[in-house]
Image (tube, rainbow, N blue to C red):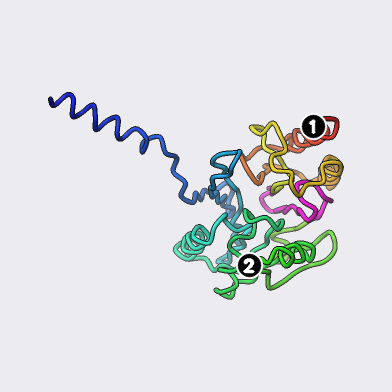
Amino acid sequence: MKFILTFIVTIMALPAMAQKDTSLKISEIAEGVYLHTSFKNIEGYGLVDSNGLIVVDANQAYIIDTPWSEDDTETLLTWIADNGYQAKASISTHSHADRTAGIKLLNSRLIQTYTSELTKELLVQGGKPIPTHTFNGSEFSLGNGLVELYYPGAGHTEDNIIAWLPKSKILFGGCIVRSHEWESLGYVGDASIISWADSIENIKAKNYDINMVVPGHGTVGQADILDHTIDLAKSAVTN
């Protein structure tokens, strides 16, 4: 009887053991640079991760893309405060929810929120919370050059931008960049597939001295992620 009860308890526990921990993950990937990863179940894709960064300068923290929910954004702000930093500003690299879901909360905390003017227009069209600050043109910077922003052209979306961190030589590619474990372009409902490869070539033409590339989804990698993305984009055009 004891064996039978133990067997039943073990079987009942298996589904819980198999469930993935979907709580917000934060890890240091370079001095003063932290990767935050949130999760969401997406129909047709299953559980998908979403990457963003926290970039620290002295006691000030700059957020590149909010987590995928307000709850995770709250957790992120708690982590920032608990580690002795002040959340100074955020930048969302395009209008999708995996980049912008926390804007409303950040606004309520009087934390500066930035997007491009084009991203703001798309948020307005979608009836979504909008940032407190915008910028025009293809280049902009935050924190006196701590984070350099660049619009390379359309790809994953019409408005996708990337962020370059010159101090740590990290390129945050966001969702225009596809990690090696992805063998497709993923969601392309708002994409410009025909422009995608050329936009990545524009990033390469900046000649960043890249130590690391952070994609919007998937594993952090090296500069060859850019060529991987070009191959996927060109394949999608021909197919």
Indicate the amino acid at tag 1: Asp
Which residue range is magenta in the image? Answer: 150-172
Task: Pick the residue in front: 137 or 122.
Answer: 122
Indicate which disc residue 185 carries: none
Q: Work out whether residue 141 can be spotted.
A: no
Task: Pick the residue in front: 8 or 68.
Answer: 8
What's the magenta bit mostly, secondary-structure-wise? loop
Residue 213, position in %: x, y?
68, 43
Indicate which disc residue 89 carries: 2
Task: Pick the residue in front: 193 or 72.
Answer: 193
Query: For residue 236, which quarter of the picture?
Result: top right
Residue 55, position in %: x, y?
61, 58
> Is 159 included in the stretch rendered in magenta?
yes
Give the residue displayed 69% in from the left and 31% down from the top. Answer: 183
Give the residue displayed 55% in from the left and 51% down from the top. Answer: 36
Above or below, 22 relative to 90: above
Residue that numbered label 1 is attached to:
231
Give the residue displayed 12% in from the left and 25% down from the top. Answer: 1
Q: Residues within 10 Å of mark 2 (few under 14, many from 20)?
A: many
